[in-house]
């Protein structure tokens, strides 16, 4: 199916990513297929074939090589894109830190998918959450329109001279990558005005030869890591600026680092990441109709971690819940750990609960989310609610006599 | 920051040691682990136990020593003869071993 | 980049591109890198994975490469190089040549997959494998290109086992089997032949490969001044060969009528000192078998 240049198209999340990437005018695309990202690279190859996308499409032989090649292109000042998921993301893990440490602003789409074993092609967020420490900016999108728009914003943020850090855009596997939605496609000329060509001092060229990717002794390593950390912190205000500018030009604002829904007077707030936000919005509406004061915070960025904005959004809520489609075995969900740290550092004492669900593609229903809000309410009424709760297990896990 | 071409020897063939001062502020660090090509902050002379001495009277300018030096420290002088950049010579002795007319002798390094 | 006029010690590029590095005195690999860059010139974009040459070439603030260079991941030199070549092409840059300098471990073992992909795509990269026959940078461990009988820290020589028990992977033939545009073997002991091959490969658009045998005084236990001499001997005794693969055919560049003695070669090296007569005979028989096949199946120059 050819994707043409119409103003509105009914496309899947993956296809929306391809449309966004085309508009961002990458020079080099390296691609290795993995479910459920395959449609992204398939559509991009079609666009290269029909010449609507002028990019070098490299058929690499592994994900490790996919990011390696993208990084190589970036190292000479070319704009590069790649995409992957779960096992592939982990296979290229060492290249992630090469890329972020090397300060190459590659943009990569990741289709959030469960990690083997057991082998699973279905969606959860274990893959990217495992790599929060990789030095990449990480953003999680709710729907296909946001996915398309973020492919454009990602380059603008990543390539900013104060940032120069690679950027991962996450879409929930199957739930978002393979569901269809009507999306608005910005005009190429409008995108060109918004996203200038890629320039960087950190590149090899004949005019100014450089040695990149050098080794450092203990005498200098800490300084380079300090720089990286600062670069990610620099991204916080720039994310807001770029979101505002995008909204001004294209008519869609996403709230910057996070978006709140009905949190102003909410007692019980759910923190959501990715497509589950959509389902949770519906539950919020239902519960509000029943007179419950509930709301949600859609955490768009997990790195840099928007602690200040998060605390402000939580405000005077009595209890918060964090939906984690992952778990750090022997501990708790990763998003919960990150949120908890923000709360602990500012001495905010409220009830907080972690809901582990949706792993390996397990459904999360509106009822499940209603249950989660109920547990939050129970916890403020003296009931003993565990910190970490597995939701919607299909079998009994109670102690056997 | 100097460019590569401004850090070369007089004859423009090889880089020379630069004065490198430890960075006082983080803003002076390069963005990421990348730096100007050919920037040398250190010499290798201290590695030597032996130093090559070239007898220009015996030398037939075949340039074999120039070709086989792993460190490239033997350079041509005009159209006849060669010389050694003692800042970067490690004293391996390959030049002396390969010279077809034995024009190079390896002499023990002294403390001065 | 120089044109196809023969490069001689007189007319070779006067500039040094690999200078001030921290390689061991007498390093054969450093010579291979140095000469290749003098042939390719200042348009070279060299990519080096983890290994000796990258470890000694760029330690902040000592940047020993005067041309554009970058360190890649250990398995990913060929793919990083492919990306660099693609980036330069997309940006319409003229006068650039991407070259990889990777060791035997980084090529025949951990880097083989990415190299295979690079050749499959025919990326415009010249890949040079500098083969010192072990993982030297990490302290002399056995690699896929460590020869039979060589002592390494992971194939120690003792009463029961006499060092490495496997033969070198036939890397040149593996690369040739991709039907690559051009591949060659070389030795720093025959450096004019090596230079000619680098020049030829660099002038070809697409994936090309050179496997250059280099001595390592530290890892082999040989005197530093013999580094070039011993690589000539390795060719003269038949343990190494000079050949090319081009236009779907193999050519043997150098076919000695009589080989020099392997026993002499063995005596000079600490890594082979433990070998007995039986071991040497095994090595000779393997050499003879390989040469029988090459003489039968490959064209003579």
Image (cartoon, coloured by chain):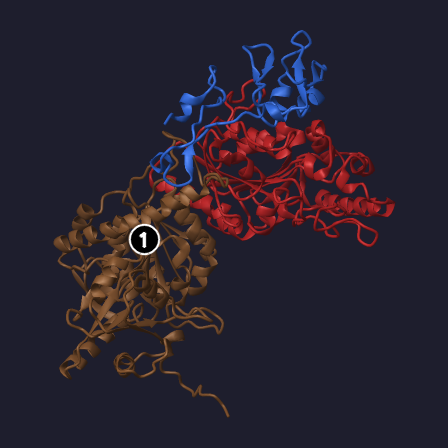
Chain colours: A brown, B blue, C red
Q: What residue occupies the far right of the structure in this picture?
A: C277
Q: In this view, does B65 lie above or below A284?
A: above
Q: In this view, does C291 lie above or below B62?
A: below
* Residue depicted at x 23% and y 51%: A237
Q: Is residue A153 left or right of residue C271?
A: left
Q: In which quarter of the image is residue A210?
A: top left
Q: Position of residue C174 (x, y in %)?
A: 61, 50
- Tell me the crowding category of disc 1: few under 14, some 14 to 19, or many 20 or more residues within 10 angstroms, Cα based: some
Query: Where is the N terminus of chain A found, in terms of image quarters?
Result: bottom left
Between C3 and C296, the residue placed more toward the observer is: C3
Q: What residue occupies the far top of the structure in this picture?
A: B57
Q: Is residue A59 above or below residue A350?
A: above
Which chain does the numbered disc 1 sit on?
A
Q: Where is residue B39 in the image (x, y as percent from the top left)?
A: 45, 28
Is residue C254 visible in the rendered image? The answer is: yes
Is residue C176 visible in the rendered image? The answer is: no
Q: Is residue C135 left or right of residue B22?
A: right
Q: In this view, does C256 lie above or below A65?
A: above
Q: Where is residue A391 in the image (x, y as percent from the top left)?
A: 36, 80
* Residue depicted at x 60% and y 51%: C109
Residue located beneath label 1 in the image: A48
Between A215 and C281, the residue placed more toward the observer is: A215
* Residue depicted at x 45% and y 64%: A87
* Residue depicted at x 30% and y 50%: A233
Q: Position of residue A313 (x, y in %)?
A: 21, 64
Q: Quadrant of residue A375?
A: bottom left
Query: How many numbered marks appear?
Result: 1
Between C26 and C212, the residue placed more toward the observer is: C26
């Amino acid at each position: 199916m050819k994707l043409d240049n119409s103003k509105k198209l009914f496309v899947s999340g993956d296809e929306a990513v391809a449309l966004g990437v085309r508009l961002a005018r990458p020079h080099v695309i390296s691609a290795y297929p993995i479910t459920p990202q395959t449609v992204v690279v398939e559509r991009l190859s079609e666009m290269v074939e029909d010449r609507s996308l002028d990019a070098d499409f490299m058929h690499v032989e592994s994900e490790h090589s996919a990011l390696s090649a993208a990084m190589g292109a970036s190292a000479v000042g070319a704009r590069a894109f790649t995409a992957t998921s779960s096992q592939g993301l982990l296979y290229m893990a060492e290249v992630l830190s090469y890329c972020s440490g090397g300060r190459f602003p590659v943009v990569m789409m990741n289709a959030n998918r469960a990690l083997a074993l057991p082998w699973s092609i279905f969606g959860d967020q274990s893959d990217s959450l495992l790599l929060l420490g990789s030095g990449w900016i990480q953003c999680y999108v709710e729907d296909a329109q946001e996915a398309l728009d973020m492919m454009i914003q990602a380059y603008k943020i990543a390539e900013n001279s104060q940032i120069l850090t690679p950027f991962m855009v996450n879409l929930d596997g199957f739930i978002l990558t393979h569901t269809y939605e009507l999306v608005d496609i910005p005009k190429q000329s409008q995108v060109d005005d918004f996203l200038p060509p890629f320039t960087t001092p950190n590149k090899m060229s004949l005019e100014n030869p450089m040695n990149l990717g050098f080794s450092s002794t203990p005498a200098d390593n800490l300084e380079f890591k300090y720089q990286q950390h600062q670069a990610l912190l620099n991204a916080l205000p720039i994310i807001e600026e770029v979101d505002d500018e995008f909204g001004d030009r294209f008519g869609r604002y996403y709230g910057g680092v996070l978006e709140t829904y009905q949190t102003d007077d909410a007692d019980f707030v759910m923190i959501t990441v990715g497509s589950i936000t959509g389902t949770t919005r519906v539950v919020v509406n239902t519960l509000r109709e029943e007179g419950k004061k509930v709301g949600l915070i859609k955490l768009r960025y997990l790195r840099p971690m928007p602690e200040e904005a998060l605390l402000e959004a939580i405000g005077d809520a009595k209890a918060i819940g964090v939906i984690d489609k992952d778990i750090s075995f022997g501990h708790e969900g990763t998003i919960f750990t990150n949120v908890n740290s923000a709360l602990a550092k500012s001495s905010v004492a409220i009830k907080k609960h972690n809901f582990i669900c949706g792993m390996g593609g397990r459904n999360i229903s509106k009822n499940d989310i209603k249950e989660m809000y109920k547990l939050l309410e129970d916890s403020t009424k003296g009931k003993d609610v565990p910190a970490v709760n597995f939701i919607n297990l299909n079998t009994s896990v109670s102690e056997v006599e | 920051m100097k460019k590569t071409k401004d850090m070369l020897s007089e004859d423009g063939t090889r880089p020379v040691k630069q004065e490198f001062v430890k960075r006082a502020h983080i803003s002076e660090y390069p963005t990421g682990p990348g730096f100007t090509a050919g920037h040398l902050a250190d010499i290798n002379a201290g590695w030597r136990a032996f130093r090559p001495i070239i007898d220009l009277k015996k030398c037939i300018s075949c340039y074999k020593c120039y070709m086989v030096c792993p460190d490239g420290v033997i350079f041509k002088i005009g159209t006849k003869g060669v010389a050694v950049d003692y800042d970067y010579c490690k004293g391996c002795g390959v030049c002396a071993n390969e010279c077809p007319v034995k024009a190079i002798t390896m002499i023990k390094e002294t403390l001065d | 980049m120089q044109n196809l006029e023969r490069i001689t010690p007189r007319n070779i590029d006067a500039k040094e591109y690999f200078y001030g590095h921290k390689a061991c005195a007498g390093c054969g690999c450093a010579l291979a890198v140095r000469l290749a860059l003098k042939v390719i010139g200042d348009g070279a974009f060299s990519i080096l994975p983890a290994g000796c040459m990258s470890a000694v070439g760029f330690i902040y603030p000592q940047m020993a490469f005067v041309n554009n260079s970058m360190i890649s991941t250990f398995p990913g030199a060929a793919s990083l190089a492919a990306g660099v070549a693609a980036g330069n092409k997309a940006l319409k840059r003229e006068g650039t040549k991407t070259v990889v300098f990777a060791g035997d471990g980084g090529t025949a073992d951990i880097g083989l997959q990415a190299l295979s992909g690079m050749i499959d795509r025919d990326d415009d990269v010249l890949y040079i494998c500098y083969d010192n026959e072990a993982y030297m940078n990490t302290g002399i461990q056995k690699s896929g290109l460590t020869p039979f009988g060589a002592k390494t820290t992971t194939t120690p020589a003792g009463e029961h086992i006499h060092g490495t028990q496997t033969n070198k992977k036939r890397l040149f033939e593996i690369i040739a089997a991709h039907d690559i545009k051009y591949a060659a073997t070389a030795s720093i002991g025959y450096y004019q032949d090596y230079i000619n091959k680098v020049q030829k490969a660099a002038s070809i658009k697409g994936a090309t490969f050179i496997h250059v045998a280099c001595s390592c005084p530290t890892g082999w236990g040989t005197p530093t001044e013999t580094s070039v001499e011993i690589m000539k001997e390795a060719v003269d005794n038949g343990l190494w060969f000079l050949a090319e693969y081009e236009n779907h055919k193999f050519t043997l560049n150098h076919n000695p009528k009589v080989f020099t003695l392997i026993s002499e070669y063995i005596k000079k090296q600490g890594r082979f000192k433990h070998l007995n007569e039986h071991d040497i005979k095994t090595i000779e028989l393997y050499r003879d078998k390989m040469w029988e096949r090459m003489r039968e199946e490959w064209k003579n120059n």
